[in-house]
Amino acid sequence: MNASRPTRENPWVNLGFNVVLPALVLMQGKDWLRGHWGGSEQGLTLLVFLAALSLPLSYGLYDLARRRRWNFWSALGLVGVLMTGGIGLLNLPPQWVAVKEATVPGLLALAVLGSQWTRRPLVRMLLLREEFFDLERIEARVAERHAQPAFERLVRQANGLFALSFGLSAVLNYALAKWIVVSPAGTDAFNAELGRMTLLSYPVIALPTLAITFAALWLLFAGLGRLTGLELEEMMVQPQGTEPSSAP
């Protein structure tokens, strides 16, 4: 067991800074700031847009400084923030929001699917993370039982399901953005639509894709249990000072 593990991220804080707070600022920020703003309405609209973008950007940089390593999902969020900021600041047509929303998960789906034919499918990096799983123990048990070929097949099956979750996310992202964001960038309507899309993206997009991701996790962990003889608790990183009992 490693004595020093990366600090775990709070998923509720992540959700707040990447989804809830930016959406609320985009939809209500102008009303909140109007009494404290002495500039033009257009300037206030831009300020609200930049304030909303600053929340996930600040959180991603804070998470990097606190944990001393890139969090894949936070890094992905930062890419999305920068792309959205570019669309808004350059006043690109609203259909570019739909393209942007589909591009990142679409590219990830292709990358995960393509990694099927490499020695290290991406599902191992994205799901089997050392913050949560005792990878040394799992791999040692797989080697002890001479189950490496079966382990590799299992990882590739889970990898295929994971690629499917990103592909579904790309399709749903595009459809949702195309339906909601129809106003020109730089307007109050654009900000409000962007906020509404951000809020709706969680139930409309995240829940279906999470369902597929959980199916991939179940397949992976159930298979690992069969191959290693370990219970799920025994595969997880244990708090310092405790050790799970080994399966016979």
Image (cartoon, rainbow, N blue to C red):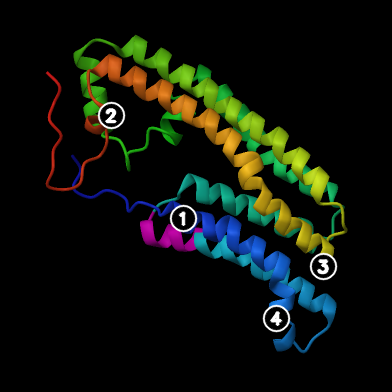
The residue where tag 2 is placed is 232
**Would residue 153 appear left or right of 137 to someone viewing this image?**
right
User: Picture coordinates of residue 246 (x, y %)?
Assistant: 13, 26
The residue where tag 3 is placed is 188
Please tell me whether mark 1 sits on a helix, a strand or a loop: helix
- Structural distance between the alpha carbons of marks 1 and 2: 24 Å
**Would residue 172 appear left or right of 14 to someone viewing this image?**
right
- Structural distance between the alpha carbons of marks 4 and 3: 13 Å
Look at the image and tell me in which quarter the C terminus lies: top left
The residue where tag 1 is placed is 12
Quadrant of the rendered image containing residue 206: top right
The residue where tag 4 is placed is 33
Q: Residue at x 53, y 31 (%)?
A: 211
**Magenta stretch, main secondary structure class:** helix
Q: Are marks 4 and 3 in contact (CB under 8 Å)?
A: no
**Along the polypeptide, which appears first: circle 4 or circle 3?**
4
Q: Residue at x 77, y 38 (%)?
A: 175
**Residue 48 is covered by the magenta coloring:** no
User: Picture coordinates of residue 20 (x, y %)?
Assistant: 59, 59
Q: Is residue 223 above or below residue 197?
A: above
Q: Residue furthest front?
A: 203
Please tell me whether mark 4 sits on a helix, a strand or a loop: helix
- Structural distance between the alpha carbons of marks 3 and 2: 49 Å
Quadrant of the rendered image containing residue 27: bottom right
Q: Which residues are magenta?
A: 60-68
